Image: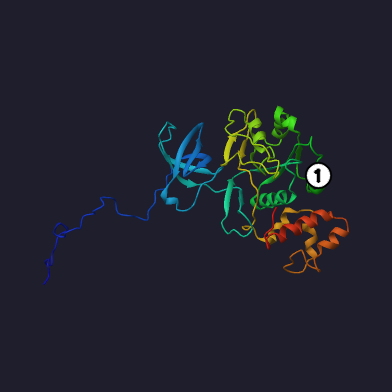
Amino acid sequence: MRRYGKHTDEDDIRSRPNRKGNRPRTNIRPKHEDAAEGMVLTVDRGRLTCLVEDRPIMAMKARELGRKAAVVGDRVALVGDLSGKKDTLARIVRIEERSSLLRRTADDDDPYERVVVANADQLAIVTALADPEPRPRLIDRCLVAAYDGGLEPLLVMTKSDLAPPDKLLELYGDLDIPYVVTSREELESGEAADQVREYLNGKITAFVGHSGVGKTTLVNALVPQDRRRMTGRVNAVTGRGRHTTTSALALPLTSADGWVIDTPGVRSFGLAHIDPSRVIHAFPDLEPGTEGCPRACSHDEPDCALDAWVEEGHAGPARLFSLRRLLATRERREGD
């Protein structure tokens, strides 16, 4: 039996009420054309501090972004309360296209990729010449990540009063990487910051380094108005430093146009996210020699053309050894 006649009206149709009282879902998303532009300064447990004009704004990611996460250095679009007052919260509705991306994994077997910094122009690799001992393999890995992510490298060597920089300069001298050599006294007095600042003007620079090398001390000297980070001592038994920076933080440079991004100290720098065929790009002194390599050459086999390239004097044996050691560590787990 028909419940309604032939000429039913909309008012005659019963509609089931929405028990939750919320609006029906739609695939149409707002464009937020009036959203304000901002830069992510730091991320802490789902809350992001962003700089909008000259105001720090607390924000959270909008649900419509899904799993896409904003990281320090990201340029974002925000809506909501942008006053920056206490207990206010804005929403990040869009993450703009990135010009560079520094990524790493916990180790070479870890499939989970960690995005460290976005939109940085430069990667300052800070290493001590002694106490703790320099780790060329870690430096090489940072170089690979920098070149792969579109960042220019800067090598900062500290504690030159404990050991000379000659060995490291010999390893990286042919790569035309800008470098700064500082002592502990210069680091503590602020002279080291003056030397490094010359390379930072007008750029966004991410600082990365092994714990205990003086990275945070240097950042504190570069940005004295925000000394929120504590510095730690190197363990006399293990030769390792204590992690004193727990999250990445972007800070405006003092007396210069640029930004410094302090990142947590690292004890490993995994490259599981990088195709091994791109690792050679971090070794521009060796890359031309691969033209004579067989197809899909691993650069560690009898027919590799790099051996002849080095013998002819185009590059140093230490660089070829470093490349092969870096490639080998992707296949077997070794300590840095």
Residue 35 seen = no
Vertically, is 146 above or below 53?
Answer: below
* Image position, residue 205 (x, y; %): 64, 40
Q: How many marks?
A: 1
- Which residue type carries mark 1? Leu
* Image position, residue 240 (x, y; %): 68, 44
Name the residue tied to disc 1. Answer: 169
Vertically, is 321 above or below 135?
Answer: below
Vertically, is 3 above or below 28?
Answer: below
Residue at the front extreme of this rendering? 237
Q: Residue at x 66, y 53 (%)?
A: 148
Q: Is residue 130 left or right of residue 44?
A: right
Residue 96 seen = yes
Q: Is 196 or 287 nearer to us in this picture?
A: 196
Q: Is 61 or 32 nearer to us in this picture?
A: 61
Residue at the right extreme of this rendering? 312
The image's colouring method is rainbow
Q: Is residue 71 left or right of residue 7?
A: right
Q: Residue at x 81, y 44 (%)?
A: 169
Q: Is residue 256 left or right of residue 26?
A: right
Q: Residue at x 64, y 46 (%)?
A: 266
Q: Is 48 or 118 nearer to us in this picture?
A: 48
* Image position, residue 305 (x, y; %): 81, 64
* Image position, residue 270 (x, y; %): 64, 54
Question: Which quadrant is home to the N terminus?
Answer: bottom left
Q: Residue at x 53, y 40 (%)?
A: 42
Mark 1 element type: helix
Other-residue count near label 1 (Cα within 10 Å), few / some / many at <14 / 14–19 / ≥20: some
Q: Is residue 66 left or right of residue 6?
A: right
